[in-house]
Image (cartoon, rainbow, N blue to C red):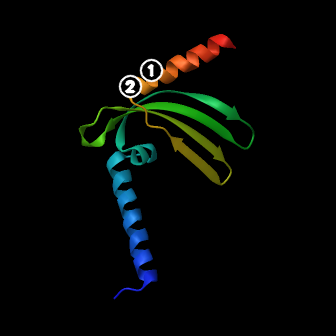
Amino acid sequence: MLDPAELIGIAVLALLGFFLFRYLRAGSLVGALLGGRIRETVGETTLASSATSSAVLPVQTLDAFSGREPIIAPTITRKAPLAVSVTPFRLTRAQALEVAELLARAARSV
């Protein structure tokens, strides 16, 4: 019988193996996190920049695994010395159009 430490080790290895499989299948970190392969990087904008850190917002389209509708993936990427943070968002076409309209309304009201 396996003790709890061995079970935890097996579970951690299984999770790492699953994520490695998704990363190799998707070809990118964003694809692995959202479950698709990057089709196109539409563009990106710089959110913040300093001598030691930066933040960018690339917008990409992904072909979803398992035949679902394509994914629109805005991703906030922050870089600093010895640190990287990637926060991808999964949007459907309808959600992306709604966000675009909200941003346009906000930009017109400023």
Q: Who's the residue at 70% across and 14% down the image? A: 110
Quick one: which residue is furthest to the left in this view? 67
Q: Residue at x 35, y 41 (%)?
A: 36
How crowded is the residue under tag 2: few (<14 C-alpha within 10 Å), some, or many (20+)? few
Q: Which residue is mark 1?
A: 97
**Percent position of residue 108, x then y:** 63, 11
Give the amino acid at mark 1. Answer: Leu
Q: CA distance from mark 1 to mark 2?
A: 6 Å
- Say which residue label 2 marks: 93
- Horizontally, is 32 left or right of 100 in the view? left
In terms of secondary structure, where does tag 2 sit?
A: helix
Residue 9 image-quadrant placement: bottom left
Depicted 20 relative to depicted 28: above or below: below
Please provide percent x and percent y for residue 41: 44, 30
Answer few, some or many: residues within 10 Å of disc 1's Cα (few below 14, many 20 plus, some between 14 and 19): few
Q: Secondary structure at mark 1?
A: helix
Residue 58: x and y, percent? 52, 32
Q: Which quadrant is home to the N terminus?
A: bottom left
Residues marked 1 and 2 touching at CB (< 8 Å): yes
Residue sticking out furthest to the bottom:
1
Residue at image position (43%, 32%) is 91
Instruction: Identify whether 28 is placed above or below 43.
Output: below
Residue type for callout 2: Arg
How many numbered marks have been drawn onto this rendered protein structure?
2
Q: Is residue 49 above or below residue 29?
A: above
Q: Quadrant of residue 20?
A: bottom left
Residue 58: which numbered mark, if any? Answer: none
